[in-house]
Amino acid sequence: MRRTLVIHHVVLPPMKEQRILQAALSRPRWATYKRLADQHSLDAASLYVWNMQMCGALLSPLHVCEIVIRNAVAAALAHAFGPRWPWHPALLQRMPADGALSALQDLHRRADRRMDTPEIIASLRFAFWQQLFTRRFEGAVWARGLMIALPNAPRCALSVVRTNIHADLDRIRHLRNRIAHHEPILERDIGADLAAIGRLIHARCPHTLGWLQRHERATTVLAASPLAGRP
């Protein structure tokens, strides 16, 4: 008969609990929360809990943003190179041999079977899509593809729009990586992160942004930050 593990929760004095948590989570990791707690007369454990909640709440906006952007870029690539763009020689010739953009060539080399375009889109990392907004692709992809991929993008010079989108994607990539590696995000401007996510989704589809805003929790969790209003 399978036994159920029963954990008895014991409420410990705050200082003792913090020593136990520090030992379990590591002293260097705990030091960030301890520094901010001491600076603002707060509890390090409470800051850690809020950081976990904030990271979890941001997953939904990040999820929608990444999928929307990769589908938008794929639409621009299909417009420029056809529905089988992942195999188009003119596109592959523009891809460097290393860095994020080499991922497409790597997929072709490593695949043990012929992948279709949707599988390739799903397999490429966030950095690949971001790097397609570099100047290298301005004429070949974005001169005609921007309004197809992102019809609600700002109406200004193409180079300005492309550069701003690249910057927003870079900001989101760094946030995504910190969350994925369980790093603190307390000292980030999360309001600016959410604004960047909102701009990108809106550029593709305002309705999708409105739908996300009705269901996401990140705005609520951010408003409850223990550091809100503190210098």
Image (cartoon, grey):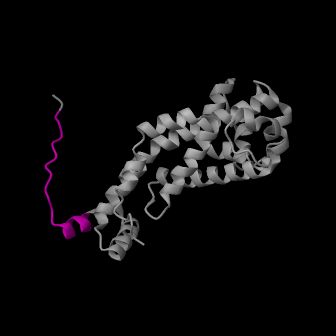
Assign the magenta stretch its main secondary structure: loop
Residue 12 falls within the magenta-colored stretch: yes
> Horizontal and vertical percent for residue 157?
79, 49
Does residue 15 appear to the left or right of 78 in the view shown? Answer: left
Establish if 113 lies above or below 166. Answer: above
Q: Which residues are magenta?
A: 3-20
Q: Residue furthest bottom?
A: 39
- Residue at 86 percent across and 35 percent down: it is 90
Residue 16 falls within the magenta-colored stretch: yes
- Residue at 33 percent across and 75 percent down: it is 38
Q: Residue furthest front?
A: 155
- In the rendered image, which quarter contains the C terminus? bottom left
In the image, 35 versus 93, the foreground residue is 35
Establish if 225 lies above or below 176. Answer: below
> Horizontal and vertical percent for residue 159?
79, 50
> Horizontal and vertical percent for residue 218?
42, 48
Does residue 51 appear to the left or right of 179 in the view shown? Answer: left
Q: Is residue 7 visible?
A: yes
> Horizontal and vertical percent for residue 163?
73, 52
Establish if 221 lies above or below 90. Answer: below
> Which quadrant of the structure image shows residue 132?
top right
